[in-house]
Amino acid sequence: MAYSFFDNAQESIQLPMQDAIVEYHPTFLNTDKANDLFTYLHKTVPWQQDQITVYGKTYMQPRLTALYAINKNPYKYSNIRMYPHEFPAILMDVLDSVNKISKEQFTTCLVNLYRDGQDSNGWHADDEKELGPDPIIASLSLGEARWFHLKHKTNPSLKYKLKLTSGSLLLMKEGSQKNWLHQLPKSKRFTEPRINLTFRKIL
Ligand SMILES: O=C(O)CCC(=O)C(=O)O
Ligand SMILES: [Fe+2]
C-alpha cells in the first residue's frame, strides 16, 4: 500500500445517540495525509454543480460534487442521477482503510466540496432505496473543520452536533439514516474549503 493509514493509535468515540450507532474516529488520517489528500482531490476531481429539486423547488446545489465507484451503478438523490467515475488509485487506498475499520464493503464514494462557509448540505437522511433498508455510511472530512448536526426524526428533543475535523472519520451505522437526519449548515465564520467523502454501498 502506498500509504499506511494506521500510523496513529485509533481513537474511537461512540456518540451517545438513541436509536442509532454512530462512531467518530478523530485521527483516522494524520495531518500530513489529510493535507496531501485534500490538495490532490481539490486539484484533480472533475467537480460538478448540479441542479437539484427538493420539496418541488429547483436550485443549484450549494456545493460541488463528484461520484466514484468500483462498479457502474449510478446514484439517484434529490431528483438527480449521478454516474460514477472510475475509482482513482489514491482513493482505493482510502477505501481499503475505511472498509477495514468499518468492517463494511463500500462500492461508491460521493465527494463534496464546500468552497467556503456559504456552501452547505441541508437536512436529509441518506435513505435512497439503492442503499438498502438501513444504510451504513462512512464520512471522511478533509480541510476546514465544520459543524455537523444530527436530529432525531420523531423526537425533536434529541439533537447532537460535533465539529468534523480534517482527517476524521464518522461512521454512521445502524439506525443513523432510518431514525435521524443530518446537515452541514452554512456559517459566515468559515472561509476555507472543505472536502467530504461519503462511502456507500450500491449493488
Ligand atoms: O459534508 C458532510 O459532512 C456530510 C455530507 C453528507 O451528508 C452527504 O453527502 O450525504
Ligand atoms: Fe448525508
Image (cartoon, grey):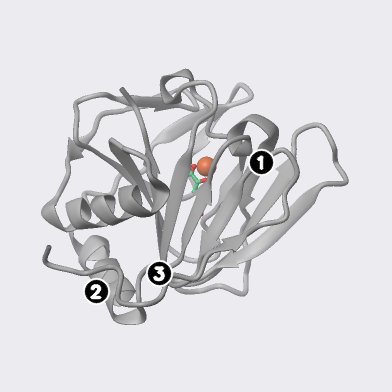
Residue on which the image places disc 3: 167
Mark 1 Cβ inside 8 Å of ligand 2: no
Whether residue 114 is visible, yes or no, is no
Q: Residue at x 31, y 38 (%)?
A: 105
Residue on which the image places disc 2: 36
Q: Could you tell whether 4 is left or right of 188 in the image?
A: left
Residue on which the image places disc 1: 20
Number of on-image labels? 3
Looking at the rendered image, the quarter that the C terminus falls into is: top left
Q: Amino acid at mark 1?
A: Ala
Of residues 129 and 184, the one nearer the viewer is 129
Q: Which mark is first along the chain, 3 or 1?
A: 1
Cα distance in 3D space between marks 1 and 3: 23 Å
Q: Nearer the viewer, mark 2 or mark 1?
A: 1
Q: Nearer the viewer, mark 3 or mark 2?
A: 3
Q: Which mark is first along the chain, 2 or 3?
A: 2
Q: SS of the residue at dot 1?
A: loop
Q: SS of the residue at dot 2?
A: helix
